[in-house]
Image (tube, helix red, strand yellow):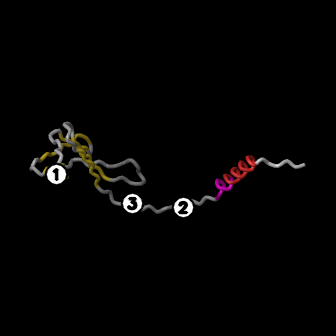
Amino acid sequence: MKQKWPIQNLKISLIAFAEVVITGSCQKVINIDLQTANSIVVIQAYVTDQPGIDTVKLNYTGSYYNPGHYPAITNAVVVITDNTGAVDTFMQVDSGVYASTHLTGIPGNTYTMKVF
């Protein structure tokens, strides 16, 4: 008399077979010709209504081929003005980092930043 496989063993066998078929499938290497693009300027500005240091970070976008490398923009002039006529020039404190302790944001004011 033949023994029948319990349904649990059949399910496990089918799953194992499916894994072998899926993971053992063919692989094809696809080469994508990535074009290099010109870098663009990235500006990150942090101005709050809390006393302290407000900062502006200036850098260029990086290359796909060199991830994590974003060249800093140094020796720039960063000026922020508001709609009341207040003007603050940020000073470079690190490579690509400009800061001011004079500016404190006021809710409702409009701010304009110029970078030269």
Residue beneath the point at 42% across and 53% down: 65
Residue beneath the point at 41% across and 50% down: 67
Three-letter amino acid code at disc 3? Thr
| Real-space Cα separation, disc 3 to disc 2, in angstroms | 19 Å
Of residues 102 and 40, which is closer to you in this image?
A: 102
Magenta: main secondary structure equals helix
Q: Position of residue 25 (x, y in %)?
A: 65, 57
Q: Which residue is identified by label 1?
A: 110
- Residue 36 numbered mark, or none: 3
Please give the range of residues in magenta: 20-25
Extreme residue in the right direction: 1
Q: Position of residue 98 (x, y in %)?
A: 22, 44
Instruction: Left or right? Give the position of 14 relative to 73.
Output: right
| Real-space Cα separation, disc 2 to disc 1, in angstroms | 50 Å
| Real-space Cα separation, disc 3 to disc 1, in angstroms | 37 Å
Where disc 1 sits, the SS reads loop
Instruction: Left or right? Give the position of 46 relative to 82.
Output: right
How many C-alpha atoms fall within 10 Å of the one at disc 1: few (<14), some, or many (≥20)? few
Q: Which residue is identified by label 2?
A: 30
In this view, the mark in front (3 or 2):
2
Of residues 98 and 108, which is closer to you in this image?
A: 108
In this view, the mark in front (2 or 1):
1
Where disc 3 sits, the SS reads loop
Three-letter amino acid code at disc 2? Ile
How many C-alpha atoms fall within 10 Å of the one at disc 3: few (<14), some, or many (≥20)? few
